[in-house]
Image (cartoon, helix red, strand yellow):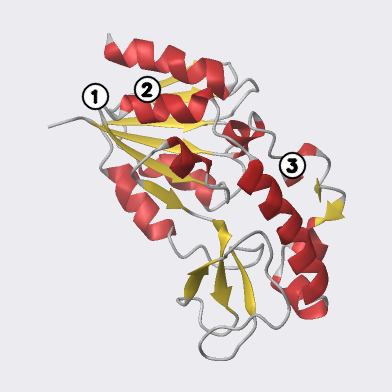
């Protein structure tokens, strides 16, 4: 039976494929205040602006290609039972070929009903428009967990983390909660690895090895360590 490797990924792994994050510039996301495009209040106030914003992001994601870090995680599936928990809304893990991916914050390539979040649809092409409705007749919105909303997959993510034989964090500052708290559910005695070029503060968490590299360099380094 393969050891269970749980990998928690953030914006840093996608940044190397050219996908920007709102944390790149003082709370601005591609020159938009996140309060204007990433909250339920923004959607209620100006749905067209929100749709335009995510349509532009979606076009970028559809054109983006997985980088060496994404590909390395697929390679690791040969020796490990790899479960990816990601904060990213892009589909680069899936494009690379990863089989088990849990999206905590939704998926930009999908839409959901405005009145029933369980009704989720794959968007055909890059655009979601006003007038696009679900089977209940409500306007479709981006399938994104916005600021101020519950993270519906969080409990399942904790469950996966609890079962890990090895745990790795890649490209996230570990400051956005509740997602950042996931490492606290990992068993204390198992090895944990954090791959990020910046300092990541993990207080009171034992058995942590830091690899201060960007994802495309750090993940092959980790693979070499694990396969030894």
- Proximity of marks 2 and 3: CB atoms separated by less than 8 Å: no
Q: Residue 207: give its label.
A: 2
- Looking at this view, name the residue that lies furthest to the left: 1
Is residue 4 visible in the rendered structure shown here? yes
Q: Is residue 104 above or below residue 80?
A: below
Neighbours of disc 3 within 10 Å: few (<14), some (14-19), many (20+): few
Is residue 205 visible in the rendered structure shown here? no
Q: Is residue 121 above or below residue 75?
A: below
Q: Residue 145: give its label.
A: none
Q: Residue 23: give its label.
A: 3
**Marks 3 and 1, how far apart at CA:** 34 Å
- Looking at this view, name the residue that lies furthest to the top: 228
What residue do we see at 40% from left, 41% from top? 84
- Looking at this view, name the residue that lies furthest to the front: 125
Q: Residue 79: give its label.
A: 1
**What percent of the width, then of the height, locates residue 106?**
54, 59
Q: Nearer the viewer, residue 215 or 201?
A: 215
- Proximity of marks 2 and 1: CB atoms separated by less than 8 Å: no
Q: Mark 2 or mark 3: which comes first in sequence?
A: 3
**Marks 2 and 3, how far apart at CA:** 28 Å
- The residue mark sitting in front, 2 or 1, is 1
Residue 78: which quarter of the image? top left
**What percent of the width, then of the height, locates residue 88?**
57, 46
Q: Is residue 129 left or right of residue 167?
A: right
What residue do we see at 79% from left, 64% from top? 52
Q: Quadrant of the C terminus?
A: top left
Neighbours of disc 2 within 10 Å: few (<14), some (14-19), many (20+): few
Q: Quadrant of the N terminus?
A: top left
Label tally = 3
Q: Is residue 191 above or below residue 103?
A: above
What residue do we see at 57% from left, 64% from top? 124
């Amino acid at each position: 039976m393969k050891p269970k490797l749980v990998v928690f990924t953030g914006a840093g792994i996608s940044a190397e494929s050219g996908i920007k994050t709102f944390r790149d510039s003082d709370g601005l996301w591609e020159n938009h205040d996140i309060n204007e495009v990433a909250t339920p209040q923004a959607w209620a106030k100006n749905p067209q602006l929100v749709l335009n914003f995510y349509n532009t992001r979606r076009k970028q994601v559809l054109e983006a290609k997985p980088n060496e870090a994404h590909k390395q995680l697929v390679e690791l599936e040969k020796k490990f039972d790899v479960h990816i928990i990601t904060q990213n809304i892009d589909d680069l893990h899936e494009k690379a070929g990863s089989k088990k991916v849990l999206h905590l914050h939704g998926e930009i390539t999908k839409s959901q009903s405005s009145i029933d979040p369980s009704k989720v649809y794959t968007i055909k092409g890059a655009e979601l428009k006003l007038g696009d409705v679900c089977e209940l007749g409500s306007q479709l919105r981006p399938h994104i967990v916005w600021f101020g909303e519950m993270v519906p997959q969080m409990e399942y993510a904790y469950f996966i983390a609890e079962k890990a034989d090895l745990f790795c964090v890649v490209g996230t500052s570990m400051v956005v909660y509740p997602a950042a708290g996931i490492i606290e559910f990992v068993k204390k005695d198992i090895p944990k690895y954090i791959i990020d070029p910046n300092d990541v503060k993990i207080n009171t968490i034992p058995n942590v090895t830091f690899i201060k590299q960007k994802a495309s360099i750090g993940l092959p380094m980790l693979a070499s360590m694990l396969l030894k």
